[in-house]
Image: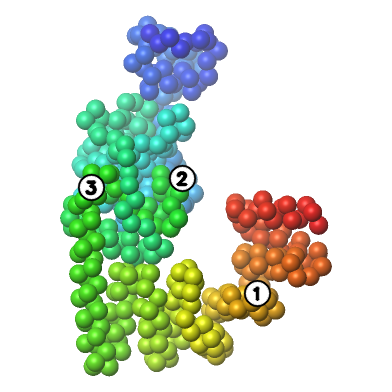
Amino acid sequence: MSEDIIKPIDVMTNDELISVLTVKKENYNDDYRTKVADELTKRGVNLEEKFKIVRYKLNLQDIKEIDVAEVIEKISLLNNPFDVIYFINYMNEHFAIQKNESVYVIHHHCLKSGFSSFFLEEEAELKSSLQNFLTNNSWLQEETEVIEHWETFAESTSSDYILRLAHLMNESDIAYCANSVQMVRFNSFKSPYSIVLPVEELPEANKVLEKLDEIKDSLHKKLEEAESKEDVDLQLELLIKLESVTPEDSLVYYNKAQLLDEKGDYQNASDALIESFNIEMSNGAVDDIEDIENYLVSILDKIENKLNSLHCLATIFAFKGDVENSYGYYKKIIDLDENDAMAHLHLGHHYYSHTEDDNRVKIHFNKYIELEPESEERESIEEILNNL
């Protein structure tokens, strides 16, 4: 019998009693478990009813409740490697599932022991583990190998790039986990998307990068041929494919912008040009910044969604040190969308640094905090507000 029995049965909580009959049942003898079951019966607690309703959520959706019989059906909601289904048992432990082409990736979390992750190949194994987990029984099979050490194989701001890598890894039968904001198991990387691997998979995974280089070279050759034939549509098709192979290549987006402009597709042209600008900005240097500025200004009246262009123009003028014009574009953004958090943040800083208008500082900073209550900027902003 367990040594941690410190309270009489009649003063134990329902959850403590239930754990004796489920997750901790191996620690107690038959006589003690019988007394616990009698106490639950006396309290009107029916275990079968407790475990009949299951909590779950898909990705970032709100938590929902379903009948335990419907659990396995929900696995079909996993459409790509980023998708995650979370199941939550009566003890508030999480059982998260992702699906690669030939393997399920399982992540377990509880407050006491933290995270653990492993792979399951068969749906039958998954079903057995999941059902035992949801009924608070022993669910981790003895032969299951928990992954002790994960390594980041690739990370990017581009989901398409990570999905392209994932596809190649499926072809090579490499077990991996695709990480995004939807997966709380790995959410501390500098980029929003990544692939993490067990350490032993890294040598084989590196061969995938060689395949990706071959794909890139092939696409560039086809692009040269399309350029020589002045086939604009084919060039665009190939550039879109290159985006998922070389997402950090600003020239891909710049060339795409030029071709879209030729076709009169100004909205997508401006979006591609802005992406090119953002990549160059992240690398610390921007070529042809005046050309980008002039183009975006010239097509503002030709596009419906102006917010991206206005944000980019505000950034360009701030980069050039033209505070007044940058501030003016942020005001235009607020005129179009009063709930644009970043515009409020920048305007708050502008009024705080360049004016004595404390009221406007408060308006914009308070609005930003309202819109982004979990922001890392919140503490520094509240300090400013407290000192006004």
Residue type, mark 2 in image = Lys
Q: Is residue 240 above or below residue 376?
A: below
- The front one of 138 and 373 is 373
Evaluate whether residue 272 shows in this view: yes
Evaluate whether residue 174 shows in this view: no
Q: Give the residue displayed 21% in from the left and 51% down from the top.
A: 203
**Pointer 3 or 1: first along the chain:** 3
Residue ID for mark 1: 330
**In the visual, does 298 lie left or right of 247?**
right
Residue type, mark 1 in image = Tyr
How is colour applied across the structure in the image? rainbow
- The spot of residue 91 in percent (x, y) is 45, 30
- The spot of residue 234 in percent (x, y) is 27, 85
Q: Could you tell me if the residues under marks 3 and 1 are in contact, i.e. CB atoms within 8 Å?
A: no
**In the visual, does 29 lie left or right of 215?**
right
Q: Give the residue displayed 48% in from the left and 74% down from the top.
A: 285
Q: Which mark is residue 201?
A: 3
- The spot of residue 362 in percent (x, y) is 76, 61
- The front one of 165 and 120 is 165
Q: Secondary structure at mark 3?
A: helix
**On the image, which quarter does residue 226 sit in?**
bottom left
- The spot of residue 302 in percent (x, y) is 53, 89
